[in-house]
Amino acid sequence: MAKLRAGSPRLLDVLINIATVLGCIAMLFVSNEVGLAIGGGLFFMVGLWSLLFPDGPLKWASTAYPAIDPIDDRLWWISRLIGACFMIISLILITALV
């Protein structure tokens, strides 16, 4: 069984990436209502992920901006704020559908 190295992604990070790609592809082929529901679900999933694991989105951002250090605890509030905004957006989307 392969062990995860220090630089390798967590299983949850890989699942988030796969779900995001599959959700975006699925939104191309479904109706508007279902697409909004999928989009709201994706926003909620990524928002919850960034609230629980703030270093994950910071790793995404560090690929574009190498100066960002995902391990730095002082930056985690930014990731959690963005996650909370994503969750609020998803709740607005879902309530608009109901």
Image (cartoon, helix red, strand yellow):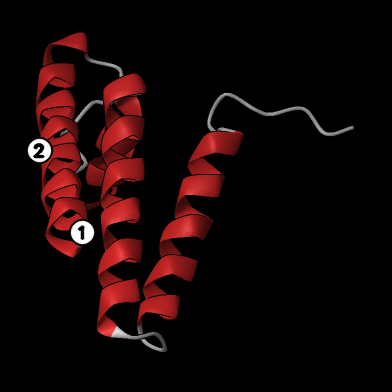
- Percent x, y of residue 48: 32, 32
Q: For residue 51, which quarter of the picture?
A: top left
Q: Describe residue 96's horizontal placement relative to residue 22 as left or right.
A: left
Compared with residue 35, is residue 98 higher up or lower down, i.e. above or below? Answer: above
Q: Give the residue furthest to the front.
A: 98
Please name the residue shown 54% across and 46% down the image.
14
Amino acid type, mark 2: Cys
Label 2 element class: helix
Q: Give the residue furthest to the top.
A: 73
Label 1 vs label 2, nearer the camera: 1
Label 1 element class: loop
* 76 and 52: which is toward the camera: 52
Amino acid type, mark 1: Val
Q: Describe residue 33's horizontal placement relative to residue 30 as left or right.
A: left
- Percent x, y of residue 15: 55, 47
Q: For residue 98, which quarter of the picture?
A: bottom left
* 44 and 20: which is toward the camera: 44
* 54 and 5: which is toward the camera: 54
Please name the residue shown 22% across and 15% down the image.
72
Disc 1/disc 2 C-alpha distance (Å): 20 Å
Q: Is residue 8 in view from this perspective?
A: no
Q: Is residue 12 in view from this perspective?
A: yes
Please name the residue shown 34% across and 73% down the image.
34
User: Dot 1: within a 10 Å radius of its alpha carbon, few (fewer than 14), some, or many (20 or more) residues?
Assistant: few
The residue to which callout 1 is attached is 98
The residue to which callout 2 is attached is 85
Compared with residue 49, is residue 41 higher up or lower down, i.e. above or below? Answer: below
- Contact flag, marks 1 and 2 (Cβ < 8 Å): no
- Percent x, y of residue 91: 17, 45
User: Dot 2: within a 10 Å radius of its alpha carbon, few (fewer than 14), some, or many (20 or more) residues?
Assistant: some
